[in-house]
Image (cartoon, grey):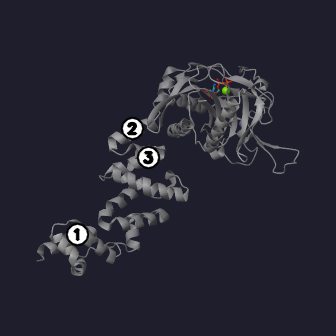
Amino acid sequence: MEYDVVIGLETHAELDTDTKLFCGCSTAFGSEPNTQTCPVCLALPGVLPVINRKAFEHTVKTALALNCEINNFVNFDRKNYYYPDLPKNYQISQNYFNLGNDGFIELNVKGKKNRIGIHNVHLEEDAGKLVHPEASDASYSLIDFNRAGVPLVEIVTKPDMRCIDEVEVFMHTLRNILLYIGVSDCKMQEGSLRFEASISLCRKGAQVFGNRVEIKNLNSMKAVLKVLAYEISRQRELLERGEQIVMETRLWDEISAVSRRMRLKEESHDYRYFPEPDLVPILVDKKNIESIRMTIPELPTKRHQRFVSEYLISEYDAGILTESKSLSDYFEECVKLTSNSPKELTNWIINDVLRVLNEKKKEIQDFNISPKMLVELIEMKSEIGGAIAKEVFSEMSNTGKDAPTVVREKNLKPLSNTAELSSLVSEIIGANPKAVEDYGNGKESALSFLVGQSMKVTKGKANPKTLLEIFKEKLANSP
Ligand code: ADP
Ligand code: MG
Ligand code: ZN
């Protein structure tokens, strides 16, 4: 039997604000537990929330970047459930009037363009974090409320994805957009970006989707892809045996690589949503929306297309360069500084810069070769030759010194002294009569061979341009 796979994602991203959503506590990651709390985020009696304007604006910005309609009447709702990490016993979220609705993300899946619908974008507060002791027989758990009340944007897709490749591209594209617009640092290892997936199978071409299974507890993109592959085969096996898929929430167990039932949907909580009485509704001003729209930079898909058409580099290379905003900024700064071809810059950035960043586990922002320094090196290449340029690059990336300094200190300056090179050329001509004869018979490649021989003798330190000139001159004058 053939099946269609149907997938939707719910994404939570912690918004980049200095303070929490409803109080003045810091949102900095990694502080001592319970040092960033106050009566408001601990939900002591009698306190009142005050909305963080920046968090609200970041959510508008996100909704706009995802092509949503912005509601001009926005309200918060209480989502009631009892869980130890939720000090108020309810979460302030949005249910009836989400900030943004009905948007889409444009994907490029292996060269094929595809649109994934965004059901809604809304703003809510994060919960605290339970810390379970290592010992399995421990009779207690610890709670850290530093995260309670940190602003989250939740992005809910429509059930529009049909395969795992699409999900992978979706997650990268969304993360990239959030980074481009600067609303979240999207550090998955710090929990700033979290995904939940819903997946169902139905008979190929069926009009009605199957029952969906929701998977929580996914702390990396890899885990999302693994659990989806697992669920596709689990659900297919069940369907083939004639069994029903039940609506349920499952957890992914990373260690055993299986998903397990957490709760059936029928048993799932009734959240008893109702409008948050402690916050007034927000009437969103069109002018404000437009001024937020103005702060959205060129987004990755558009920049990708522009790089291909403006700099004549390949789709593939443009894709790599626009993976992150800072990398594409780096590239464009280099382009501005030189008349060298963008293709050459692209090669240096993709082959050398990214390799070193990867080795050193660094981001481009922390790279110690600035665009100006890279361009300076590339412009020296015709003088020092490709092999030395690579050596200089490696030294620059280790020391942060610029190219002229490295060349001077390591004595890498090519031999350009004409007299010295001239005697070398005579020697090489004497030692390679066959190549000389070939060249005389019109074989141009013989000349490159002779230059290559000289480079070998000088261990790459001769100036290839000067060499070439001397060879041409000598060979033209020889009988
Ligand atoms: P709920 O309100 O119960 O949380 P939603 O309709 O908001 O359910 O959907 C939650 C997520 O599940 C969304 O990302 C949506 O795309 C996805 N989804 C909905 N129906 C299906 C389905 N039949 N198969 C797979 N995913 C689905
Ligand atoms: Mg939901
Ligand atoms: Zn607080």
Q: Residue at x 39, y 68 (%)?
A: 405
The answer for how far apart the CA atoms under marks 1 and 3 are is 37 Å
Which quadrant holds residue 87?
top right
Residue 149: x and y in percent read 70, 35
Q: Amino acid at mark 1?
A: Leu
The answer for how far apart the CA atoms under marks 1 and 2 are is 41 Å
| Residue hosting label 3 | 321
* Residue 25 seen from this side: no
Foreground of the two, 334 or 356: 356
Q: Residues within 10 Å of mark 3 (few under 14, many from 20)?
A: many
User: Is 200 located above or below residue 430 in the figure?
Assistant: above
User: Is 407 located above or below residue 367 in the figure?
Assistant: below
Which quadrant holds residue 11?
top right
Disc 2 is placed on an element classified as: helix
Q: Residue at x 59, y 22 (%)?
A: 206
Q: Residue at x 68, y 33 (%)?
A: 235
Which quadrant holds residue 248?
top right
Horizontal placement of 438 versus 10: left or right? Answer: left
Mark drawn on residue 447 = 1
Foreground of the two, 195 or 143: 195
* Residue 423 seen from this side: yes
Mark drawn on residue 390 = none
Q: Residue at x 49, y 44 (%)?
A: 324
Q: Mark 1 vs mark 2: which is more N-terminal? A: 2
| Residue hosting label 2 | 305
Residue 80: x and y in percent read 76, 25
Q: Quadrant of the N terminus?
A: top right
Q: Mark 1 vs mark 3: which is more N-terminal? A: 3
The answer for how far apart the CA atoms under marks 2 and 3 are is 11 Å
User: Is 68 located above or below residue 361 in the figure?
Assistant: above
